[in-house]
Image: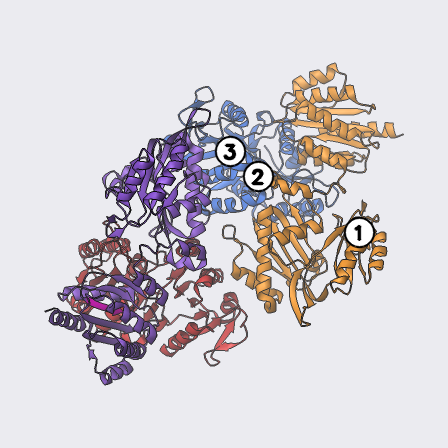
Chain colours: A red, B blue, C orange, D purple
Amino acid sequence: MSVLIGRETRLVVQGITGREGEFHSRAMQAYGTRIVAGMTPGKGGQTALDGTVPVFDTVADAVRETGANTSCIFVPAPGAPDAILEAVGAGIGTIFCITEGIPALDMVPVVEAVRQAGARLVGPNCPGATSPGRAKVGIIPDSVHREGDVGVVSRSGTLTYEAVQAMTDAGIGQSTCVGIGGDPIIGTTFLDVLQLFAADPETRALVLIGEIGGAAEEEAAAWAAEHLADIPKAAFIAGRTAPEGKRMGHAGAIISGRAGTAASKVAALEAAGFRVAGSPTELPGLLRVAGHRG
Amino acid sequence: MSVLIGRETRLVVQGITGREGEFHSRAMQAYGTRIVAGMTPGKGGQTALDGTVPVFDTVADAVRETGANTSCIFVPAPGAPDAILEAVGAGIGTIFCITEGIPALDMVPVVEAVRQAGARLVGPNCPGATSPGRAKVGIIPDSVHREGDVGVVSRSGTLTYEAVQAMTDAGIGQSTCVGIGGDPIIGTTFLDVLQLFAADPETRALVLIGEIGGAAEEEAAAWAAEHLADIPKAAFIAGRTAPEGKRMGHAGAIISGRAGTAASKVAALEAAGFRVAGSPTELPGLLRVAGHRG
Amino acid sequence: MKIQEADAKGLLLAQGLPVPGWSVARTPAEVRSAAESILADGAGRVVIKAQVLVGGRGKAGGVKLAGSAAEAEAVASAILGMSIKGITVRKVLVAAAADIVKEYYLSAVLDRAARRILLMGSAEGGVEIEQVAAERPDAIVTIHAHPHLGLGDWQARQLAFRMGLGGHLRAAVGIARGLVRTMLAYDADLVEINPLAIIRETSADGTVVERLVCLDAKVTLDDSALPRHPELEALRDLDEEDPADAEAREAGISFIRLNGTIGCMVNGAGLAMTTMDLVKRAGGEPANFLDIGGGAKSDRVAEAMRMILSDPKVNAILVNIFGGITRGDEVARGLIDARAQQLRDVPMVVRIVGTNATEAAELLRAARFETAATLDEAAARAVAAARTAGA
Amino acid sequence: MKIQEADAKGLLLAQGLPVPGWSVARTPAEVRSAAESILADGAGRVVIKAQVLVGGRGKAGGVKLAGSAAEAEAVASAILGMSIKGITVRKVLVAAAADIVKEYYLSAVLDRAARRILLMGSAEGGVEIEQVAAERPDAIVTIHAHPHLGLGDWQARQLAFRMGLGGHLRAAVGIARGLVRTMLAYDADLVEINPLAIIRETSADGTVVERLVCLDAKVTLDDSALPRHPELEALRDLDEEDPADAEAREAGISFIRLNGTIGCMVNGAGLAMTTMDLVKRAGGEPANFLDIGGGAKSDRVAEAMRMILSDPKVNAILVNIFGGITRGDEVARGLIDARAQQLRDVPMVVRIVGTNATEAAELLRAARFETAATLDEAAARAVAAARTAGA
């Protein structure tokens, strides 16, 4: 098994006819993901990916005609919140929003609407998720992965690839690797993903990759301390040497006051039983030390 | 027992220091309703009703200090939607809004917020409810009532008094009498109240008092046909002779197209086993014919 | 409150919707001059539409085309002054006749049952939507706006695609959202475009373009919200309003004149309708619906009595008051005052129960009013009185 | 994006909030003239406040009072040109010194954890709220606006009562709602009033009134939303911005200058911070944070290299690219172009993995770049190169 995505995933790609949407849809399809539909308003009736995928005007049409249950959104920022609400309205259960640059206040009503509908949104501004050997939704490069039983959750993009590559190089495979995105307002948190992994019988170890800023890592650690005591866990926190009060790239990485510092996160994770790495390359070794036999 | 209100009702009156609020609060208190708090912003710390009721600045304060579980709102129309949301936010479970003249579109987001919170709103523009011998919330004159086992639901004000008086005069008492209000957007419908009565073991007969316009009576009748077959039921519909296309007083009473005519309502109610009266004075006799032994 | 087509179009235009230009004229000469300028701008024909607040203008001959200014003047002469469902036409709308490619229907309405704003669209425009609804319900597309988030673009697109407006997607989305915006901006309970139309236009360089526009508009406003839109009060059509209606509104009274002989004065709309029903059941005909509202004082009662008596058909009066907020003695005092001032003596049956009924009974007895104990009895006696008076 | 106090006050004023008047001056002479007019209007003293985008102005001596125009000029001479946390003061705000009765704190902030707008208030204003939060958390009142309905009046009243502002209820409600309105209107992620103050004013007729006003204002804007607020771009303070920052922004690069010697070029913020961490761990000091963003082409890479080399402290460069959307060969080409044009020869260690890494490796080998396979190795060799160069 896996979390969020897997063999049962029937994907509709919103914005499939755009440049990014088409490029990554091809990659997802090549990986084995079942892309059952594309959606671009005004292109209903056409096909995408060399005739293999029907395109619909609305997500509702795509769901009715193809039974899509998961959506991946490549719609540009001004239209992305609406695209998420469309997926929710059409009954899609799991929505990945890859789009970056969505104003934070646009997301406030959207995540509430997602919550009320009982749907799940991953992102925005996230690389998506890959369940190696099963399915990939988003933009994480295939090559970094290996099938296995370690659940990985991260709010970074390329840092995730780095960490996962290190694991794969060391022979440690992943059950699912989830990039939750670094925006201020996101649909799925570290804690949410840990809870999903906790319920997944095929995930037998965990890696959390965090960054300075916010308190989401601390919140997840507190829950893990109580509920994930018996599972091998490792973590990495980026930004230990970042100077205070500077935004490092995306808005997620800002230190304000004492909360959200690398030290606070490392301490919380260690207290919860995570082995915290000094470099992503140390993660495989720490997992083994923690008892993982992948 | 009774529905919506009863001996367990702990009432906070929002707008208790206004002219109407104070007048009707006195009447409610005299009837035996437990008014535990009043609320008027800026008058926190004062008392109302001759020192018997503490006044708070916010409903949250009233709930915390007095355990209020029911609210009655006499706040003027411009502030009434906010007053309802305040009651919901403070955790009040049952809210009666007596205020009339609230623009209909103001109520659209409010009833949704009430629904989401799992609270119940009766009204706006309703006379409230009375459970004879137990409690009265709102403005229905005490004198029309008698304790008994007939549940009464109506969307009119004075017409309700007329009908209930006729029952009382004939020796037929009421378990609870609920005025749901005649506005376009209301919190509690005929159907909602029938469902409450259906679950109340002490309600053994039903009277529904409707009006032309809308389809709420028909909707309630359809449910009653399935779920309330075995209980004596009588009804009265006002506006049989009203000319088509004219608004009679409040917005509720307009006939548009075929749905919502008196004939359609009478037919639906008769099909559901209601005995439909030609005059309110016929209701007691019809209840007896229907098998009520009150 | 209903408003005229021209005013409805003004509201839509103010909210950014595409509404082709129009003008309003009150005389054939004004119509001629408006037509001249429209035809000079390149239009082939003009359309002249009666401005009345009742439906069925077209069938009644209130909408006509004209190919020249002279014809427009002649057509306007016929329409102005004509009667449509009892309303005299006092003004017309003049506009360029559109070259219609296809007609649609689109409206936003307050859906009481769902407690949301409902968008209703159909590819069968230009006809009565009630008829489409009855005959081919599948031809109507409905979408509810979210009660908190409003109408999403995605919903507007869905509506447009289902209506077959995919070729005018952007315009259709803009119009659908505009209808909801108009509802919210003015507290309308209905904003209806029928027809919404694709029209063909020739631009200055000779190219022909197709455009989605609002050709007709109907807006009704929520009376409860008028206090916060004082500017909309100016749209009330006093031409069409019974002067008694305006008086009643001023006094806080709901009043509708009907065709019978028995004047009714009641507190509460439901009870007022019931009173009418019982008058009819007793063999009489109500002359009016009249609700004096809650908590009426004696002066409002006297005003209501004046309104009832202003109808010469009235030959008996039934007063039915169930006191709650309203105090029976206040009503009795108002009746006594009114009788002291009234110009003609009409038999009156009064029934007052509820709050302060005892005091009222005493006042009425002292003033020698005819009273009744129950509503059924009151109705029967009022009908009998009307029969005697009418005989 | 941070904006100056004066600009923040302008936004609040535009949203209808009560902000006493002010002017901005860039020279002591301008301050003198502003002070003269303020004192002529009846103020007893003026306040002169350094306009810098860093906190702690007061402690640094950047906020002063003056009782006369001459004193104001003298004070301004001291403040203008002074350095506060490394920022040179180039302008000051001049306003009438308020007669403060009591100070409060009020802010609206985007609460990431709750995913809602958070209102935070305290009766302990004028001091740093972080300190109040740490020492007396009970002194802070918090209320979340509803994600769909916004901040209700009832919530604003609750906030006001809990802050002890019941005596200025209407004003406090207006200000609380105004903060949320300001956030939404400009896509701010923080709108902070500290102090919010009750001030005493003498009106023209000599009566003394108390009024709740915003005495200071801090607003930060969501960078992601700036594209839809082009008018706010004018509020960017170019005086305080490193010219390299503006260049970086134009090029789509995130760049922050630091104090070390090893220039870093990375794709992705998290990986960029990690690269800095590993440089430090290997004993070096990063000269900058630099994220070339996703899908960078060779020209952006060359631009990033110019920015790194514009820092004379840089004596080694570490390039770390994990290709995903970004293609390794594009980066390699950019590096080759940049080296062809660069003015000084700085040792460079390049690590490119992921998408098109093989092609990149070939290009780099052909151009005789020093490459590394892992990030740890790359960091170690960059630090070694810097040591050699610095020795």
Secondary structure under the numbered disc 1 in the rendered image: helix
Name the mark on residue B73. 3
Could you tell me if residue C365 is visible in this image?
A: yes
Residue tagged by mark 1?
C30
Query: Disc 2 to disc 1, how far (Cα)?
Result: 42 Å
Secondary structure under the numbered disc 3 in the rendered image: strand
Instruction: Report if the CB atoms under discs 2 and 1 are less than 8 Å apart.
Output: no
Q: Is residue B134 above or below residue D354?
A: above
Residue tagged by mark 2?
B102
Could you tell me if residue B69 is visible in this image?
A: no
Q: Disc 1 or disc 3, which is closer to the eye?
A: 1
Instruction: Report if the CB atoms under discs 2 and 3 are less than 8 Å apart.
Output: no
Query: Magenta segment range?
Result: D262-266
The single residue placed furthest to the top in the displayed view is: C366
How many C-alpha atoms fall within 10 Å of the one at disc 1: few (<14), some, or many (≥20)?
some
Three-letter amino acid code at the position of disc 3: Ile
How many C-alpha atoms fall within 10 Å of the one at disc 3: few (<14), some, or many (≥20)?
many
